[in-house]
Structure formats: C-alpha cells, structure tokens
C-alpha cells in the first residue's frame, strides 16, 4: 500500500488556514532563514508532501512564529483556555493541537476562537 502525504492543501485544511497562507509561510520562511518552515518529506514533480504525523511539527512551528505588536506570539485567550481544559483531561499540547486541527477541518466555517470556546463548553457540561 502506498504511503500517504499531505500537500499544501492538506496542511492548510488541517491547520484551518488557506492554501495561500501555507504558500506564504514557505516563501517567507525558507530553509536557511531564522525560522524555516518544516521541510517536506517528499517532493513529486516539484510539489511538496509531508507525512500526516508531521502536523504537530507544523503547528509548533506556526505557534512559535513571532507575533505582531505587544505580547507577540501569545496564544489567544480562547486557545489558552482550551489548552488548559485539554490538559485537565490528560491531553498534552501536541494532542490538543491535533484535536483542534481535526475539528477545524470538520467545521471550516468556525474560527479557531469559536472552536476553542465550543470545545471548552462541551467539556464543562
């Protein structure tokens, strides 16, 4: 059985962002820069591919991007609350972020803040 990889579109869907955002990250943060985007595991006809288990690496990369303005890089209040509740239920940060990314794919109409609030609400009831 052939291995499956995520392309730019698959990464975008898993992270709840546009395909354009992933392209911008790769362009703005190339290999050799201060904060390079995670290298693909494979390239097919010039198209990059990442193993699905690398989503956590890419989430950590994105979370460590320098933020804009005061307090840059801090997670939103909704994400902080979500991570706190996830930890209370035994999920480590990587598991919590993979869960959040999966829900983002299932509910693309919801923002990350809405997803975080919804999950926290489900856990508290």
Image (cartoon, rainbow, N blue to C red):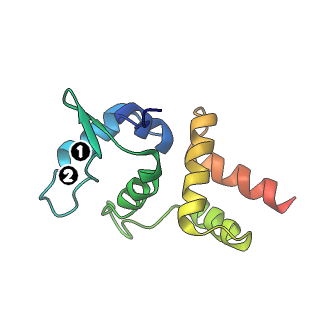
Residue at label 1? 26
Identify the residue at horizontal 18%, vertical 43% (top origin): 27
Q: How many marks?
A: 2
Residue 12 in sight in this render: yes
Residue 107 in sight in this render: no
Residue at label 2? 29
Q: Residues within 10 Å of mark 1 (few under 14, many from 20)?
A: some
Identify whether 48 is placed above or below 39.
above
Q: Residues within 10 Å of mark 2 (few under 14, many from 20)?
A: some
Tell me the quadrant of the picture where the C terminus can be found. bottom right
Identify the residue at horizontal 39%, vertical 31% (top origin): 9
Contact check, label 2 and label 1, Cβ < 8 Å: yes
Task: Please give left or right for residue 57 compared with residue 99 in the image.
Answer: left
Image coords of residue 82 (percent x, y): 64, 62
Identify the residue at horizontal 49%, vertical 64% (top origin): 75
Identify the residue at horizontal 46%, vertical 51% (top origin): 53
Rendered image quadrant of residue 33: bottom left
Image coords of residue 91 (percent x, y): 65, 67
Task: Please give left or right for residue 40 compared with residue 4 in the image.
Answer: left
Q: Secondary structure at mark 2?
A: loop
Q: Secondary structure at mark 1?
A: helix
Task: Please give left or right for residue 26 compared with residue 32 in the image.
Answer: right
Measure how far apart labels 2 and 1 are at the Cα level.
5 Å
**Residue 116 versus residue 8: which sits nearer the camera?**
8
């Amino acid at each position: 059985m052939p291995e499956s990889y995520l392309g730019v579109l698959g990464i975008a869907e898993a992270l709840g962002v546009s395909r354009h955002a992933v392209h911008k990250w790769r362009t703005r943060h190339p290999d050799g820069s201060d904060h390079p985007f995670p290298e693909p595991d494979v390239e097919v006809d010039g198209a990059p591919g990442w193993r699905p288990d690398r989503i956590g690496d890419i989430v950590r990369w994105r979370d460590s991007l320098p933020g804009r303005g005061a307090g840059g890089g801090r997670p939103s209040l909704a994400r902080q609350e979500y991570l706190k509740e996830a930890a209370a239920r035994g999920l480590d940060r990587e598991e919590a972020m993979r869960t959040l990314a999966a829900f983002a794919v299932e509910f693309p109409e919801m923002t990350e803040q809405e997803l975080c609030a919804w999950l926290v609400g489900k856990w508290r009831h």
